[in-house]
Image (cartoon, grey):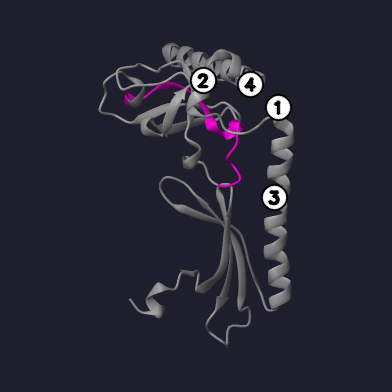
Amino acid sequence: MNQEQEKEIIGGYAVKNSVWIGNNRFVFGISEDEKEPNRYMKCIAKESQLFVRYESAFVYDDYLEAMRAYQADITAELDALEKARAEIGLPDIRCLHKSDLIPVDSKMNIAGKVVAIHEKYLNDGFKDISHQLYYVDGGFGVEASSRGRACYGCNVYTGEKTRIERYEIIGIVPDDKIPGYAKKNIETYLQNQQRMREEREER
């Protein structure tokens, strides 16, 4: 494969620099068309399970202006991560390890449990307890001796519905290690699930 084939192009701009922070990739690119009046581009790439979405994309005719904008995006994301960590309110936000958890084997049904995923599956910037814990209550992956891997439930930090894979789980979180905010968010999640079931039954 030659060098030309290895280039990553986004919207006609060759990627010259990029960095992952959390779930976002910050990109700086330069157009190889020297007649292009706005030769510099910065954007934020957000990945989902199906596609990549580009946000905050701007082009510039001045290199320094473009780099400052690129730097500002990175700084804002770092500030947001720092604020989020401070809001966790725990003296120790490091990820839990197997020794902290109740072991899980393939014969266990884990529905209705708070589980921890291995930190190797977390993006840099998200390697902390708030992004490690999930409440799971559905999917073939929660069942005992199932060939399925998908586990559905919620991220106990954000309260958002989500999916994780059974192979990512390293153990069940003991009740005394579940943060207070997690218990509140799980309660809210379960109430919302119950309300949606009742609404479906009324239709």
Q: Earlier in the sequence, mark 4 or mark 2?
A: 2
Residue at 42 percent of width and 45 percent of height: 49
Quarter of the picture holding the C terminus: top left
| Nearer to us in this view, 193 or 201 | 193
Residue mark closest to the camera, 2 vs 3: 2
Mark 3 — residue? 78
Q: Is residue 41 left or right of residue 71?
A: left
Q: Secondary structure at mark 1?
A: loop
Specify the amino acid type for callout 4. Answer: Pro
Res. 17 mark? none
Question: Gap in Å between the C-alphas at discs 3 and 1?
Answer: 19 Å
- SS type, badge 2: loop
Mark 4 and mark 3: Cα distance apart in space: 24 Å
Cα distance between the residues tagged 2 and 3: 29 Å
Q: Is residue 76 left or right of residue 130?
A: right
Give the Cα separation between the discs numbered 4 and 2. 10 Å
Specify whether residue 50 is painted magenta: no
Task: Look at mark 4 in the image and give the residue it sits on.
Answer: 179
Looking at the image, tell me whether mark 2 or mark 1 is earlier in sequence order. 1
Task: Give, as a single range, the part of the protein colored magenta.
Answer: 124-140
